[in-house]
Image (cartoon, rainbow, N blue to C red):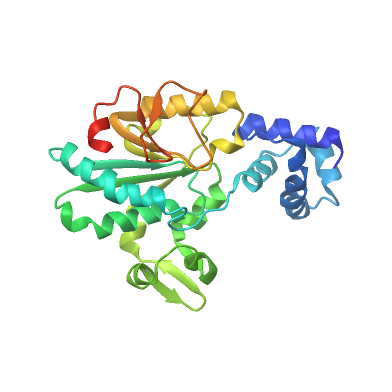
Amino acid sequence: MKISDFDLYKDLLKEKSGLSLTQDKAYLLESRLSPIAKKWGFESLDAMSVKLRGVPDRNLVNDIVEAMTTNETSFFRDTRPFDLFRDTVLPYMKQARGTRRKLRIWCAASSSGQEPYTLAILLKEAAAQFPGWSFEIVATDISTEILAQAKEGIYSQFEVQRGMPVTLLLKYFTQNGDKWQLNSDIRQMVRFDQFNLLDSMLRLGSFDIVYCRNVLIYFDEKTKSKVLNGIAAQLESDGYLFLGGAETVLGLTDAFKPLPDKRGMYVLQNSEHLKAAS
């Protein structure tokens, strides 16, 4: 790919999604955008690049952004964040929200839905401990196409084998040929919504728990800071933030601090529940 074309896509993606691409990721552009060029009837990526320099079709731009921002995910990915949710967060929230009996959870950049559905299954498993409670899981992504897929809750054998325990698979999924679909009671626990992390988060409301894992690694430092500060403004004073294992808040924001011995788990700097959580 020509440097001038790489810069064209790099600037477009930065403006529309916050995605920060370096030259060593040029291969990703070629592998992910070649099918888009073919879909739109362009003979090559070069031809699509020429079109983008004129007055591009908005739907073409959307297809390019969606192709580049759809990320890999799996059920119970990395395990630890979900163990902490079950063993640390839920016991705390049971006590702290005992009067309100309501939890709001946000899964940012939820992709094809495995993360929010994992949380829904864990909440379903713990339902006996929370009589009369309501749980709202809001799962957002920039890609409308991947959200439509997530809403269906249909996964391949390969996808369900990646992390989903067999006992939970048989309990919460229905097999149809070589596909598995989540049962409706689990799907109904998650509300999927299109959202760009560069936009104002005010319309999403406040949350008790936020999962924003393996997203910040694609942003530059300025964008990371903006996203983290935006989350801090929407998080309840004693809420929890989960980031990916390779991500950090250090040098990006003073709003959060990590919990000791709980990698990837953060609370607000002025949080009052540090002793209870640690």
Q: Nearer the viewer, residue 171 or 253?
A: 253
Counting from the top left corner in percent of width and height, residue 45 is at: 82, 46
Q: Nearer the viewer, residue 214 or 59?
A: 214
The residue that appears at 14% across and 53% down in the rendered structure is 131
The answer to whether one can see residue 244 in this image is: yes
The residue that appears at 25% across and 46% down in the rendered structure is 90
Q: Quadrant of the N terminus?
A: top right
Relative to residue 110, is residue 150 depicted above or below? below
| In this picture, residue 260 sits left or right of residue 133 | right
The residue that appears at 26% across and 60% down in the rendered structure is 125
| In this picture, residue 163 sits left or right of residue 29 | left
- Indicate the quadrant where residue 118 lies: bottom left
- Indicate the quadrant where residue 39 lies: bottom right
Q: Residue furthest bottom?
A: 177
Q: Nearer the viewer, residue 90 or 230?
A: 90
| In this picture, residue 273 sits left or right of residue 24 | left
Counting from the top left corner in percent of width and height, residue 212 is at: 46, 40
Counting from the top left corner in percent of width and height, residue 243 is at: 46, 39
| In this picture, residue 260 sits left or right of residue 216 | left
The answer to whether one can see residue 55 in this image is: no
Number of labelled discs? 0
Counting from the top left corner in percent of width and height, residue 117 is at: 39, 55
Q: Quadrant of the C terminus?
A: top left
Relative to residue 101, is residue 184 depicted above or below? below
